[in-house]
């Protein structure tokens, strides 16, 4: 192997910091530079909606340490890349050379506000979480646009404070990922906690300046003290303009986290897996994938074998105090193949067997170790 003389990681994200740690663990002793965009440095994002909205003391527990790694950290956003000259330029004017580049700039919140419309609230950064937490302290009503994982977690934070909240989406809560069966159960449970769901026929429009409500295609208008947009994410790829690395879905990678440009790799929420065979391009912006891809990108940048798959099919969420852990392929279609326990009582272990021979295991309200869920999914798929 010929190790890269210098490795540059752009993005002080979970994927980026994982790549940095793994580069050193794999024996890379050469120059290692990490470019970040936020002054406070690297931190874990999943707790923002699960913990930080409820507990200010959680702010100090999120940091992702880089101690002892001998890494040059530059906290100035990347603004341009030249893949021919192998350089990246930052906002403060630095031009950093590299032999291998790992793109890990993540994604930003998708916004719905019109140009110049003030007051839209989103949740993507620690600063967003602090701002939203402060607003929750005085709110008496709330609207959440988007019934995905983030939207339902934000709605749960509202409900925990006794704030009546309406969630608006074109699909029922979590249905796009968890399927109709679990979506119905989660929707019913949420209703008992004061979370109302309104299914729209099309996209909602934010109203007011500053934002005070939403307008739906059928003419329905809603207002609230607090309106939060949880409408997905947009990969942070503007700085890659002109490189041919990025498109609408982000930076395309293969199963080794390699891009189409020699010497450039990518990991985390900025990526999508390029189509292979009958499988289309697909994004999987889960924290477990950020970790798996960070490790894989580090190995690929050094020309080493992958430490494991660059995809991890585990994720979890929490809605109204009930945890949902999933291992396996999504979405979940139809009824579960097997159910142990009671879904209605919020304590069940479920499996779905898929036509391709794989299985998905779900711990619904159960404290089930991830390793046990993986074993259950593997056992079910071999039945």
Image: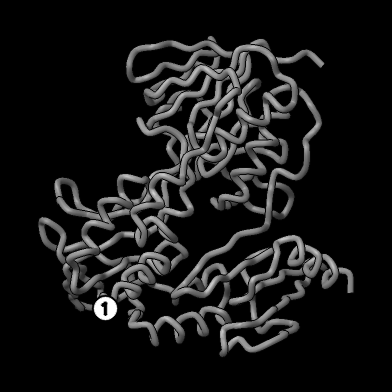
Which residue is situated farthest in the right direction here? 383
Q: Residue furthest left?
A: 209
Q: Is residue 38 above or below residue 187?
A: above
Q: Nearer the viewer, residue 188 or 54?
A: 54
Q: Residue 31: x and y, percent?
A: 60, 12
At 18% across and 47% down in the image, what residue appears?
Answer: 115
Name which quarter of the figure residue 18 lies in. Answer: top right
Apparent side of residue 355 relative to residue 145 in the rendered image (left or right): right
Q: How far from the left and from the top, in percent, is residue 260?
A: 63, 29
Give the colouring mode of the picture: one colour
What residue sits right under mark 1 in the picture?
164
**In terms of depth relative to the viewer, which is nearer, 188 or 53?**
53
Q: Nearer the viewer, residue 126 or 98?
A: 126
Residue at 62% from the left image edge and 43% from the top image edge: 291
Q: Quadrant of the C terminus?
A: bottom right
Residue at (62, 48) in percent of width and height? 289
Quarter of the image with the N terminus in it: top right
Mark 1: secondary structure: loop
Horizontal and vertical percent position of residue 278: 72, 55
Q: Is residue 160 above or below residue 370?
A: below
Q: In percent of the image, x 35 and y 79: which residue is there?
A: 195
Q: Is residue 324 above or below residue 52?
A: below
Q: Is residue 87 above or below residue 301?
A: above
């Amino acid at each position: 192997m010929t190790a890269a003389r210098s490795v540059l990681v752009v993005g002080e994200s979970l994927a980026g910091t994982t790549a940095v740690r793994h580069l050193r663990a794999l024996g890379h002793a050469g120059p290692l530079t990490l470019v970040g965009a936020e002054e406070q440095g690297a931190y874990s994002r999943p707790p923002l909606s699960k913990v930080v909205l409820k507990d200010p003391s959680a702010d100090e527990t999120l940091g992702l340490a880089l101690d002892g790694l001998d890494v040059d950290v530059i906290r100035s956003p990347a603004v341009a890349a030249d893949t021919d000259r192998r350089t990246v330029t930052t906002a403060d004017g630095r031009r950093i050379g590299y032999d291998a580049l790992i793109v890990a700039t993540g994604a930003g919140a998708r916004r719905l506000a019109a140009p110049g419309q003030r007051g839209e609230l989103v949740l993507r950064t620690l600063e967003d979480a602090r701002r939203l937490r402060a607003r929750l302290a005085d709110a008496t009503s709330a609207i959440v646009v988007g019934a995905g994982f983030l939207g339902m977690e934000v709605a749960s934070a509202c409900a925990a404070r006794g704030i009546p909240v309406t969630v608006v989406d074109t699909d029922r809560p979590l249905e796009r990922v968890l399927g109709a069966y679990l979506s119905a159960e989660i929707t019913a449970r949420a209703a008992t906690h004061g979370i109302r769901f309104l299914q729209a026929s099309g996209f909602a429009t934010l109203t007011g300046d500053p934002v005070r409500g939403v307008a739906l295609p059928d003419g329905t208008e809603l207002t609230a003290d607090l309106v939060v947009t949880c409408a997905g994410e947009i990969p942070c790829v503007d700085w890659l303009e002109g490189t041919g690395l990025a498109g609408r879905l982000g930076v395309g990678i293969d199963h080794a986290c390699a891009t189409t440009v020699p010497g450039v790799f990518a990991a985390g929420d900025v990526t999508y897996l390029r189509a292979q065979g009958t499988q289309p391009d697909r994004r999987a912006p889960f924290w477990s994938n950020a970790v798996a891809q960070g490790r894989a990108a580090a190995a690929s940048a050094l020309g080493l074998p992958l430490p494991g798959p660059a995809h991890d099919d585990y994720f979890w969420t929490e809605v109204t105090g009930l945890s949902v852990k999933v291992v396996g392929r999504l979405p979940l279609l139809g009824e579960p193949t097997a159910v142990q326990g009671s879904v209605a009582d919020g304590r069940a272990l479920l499996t779905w067997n898929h036509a391709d021979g794989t299985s998905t295991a779900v711990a619904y309200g159960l404290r089930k170790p991830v390793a046990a869920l993986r074993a259950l999914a593997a056992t079910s798929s071999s039945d």
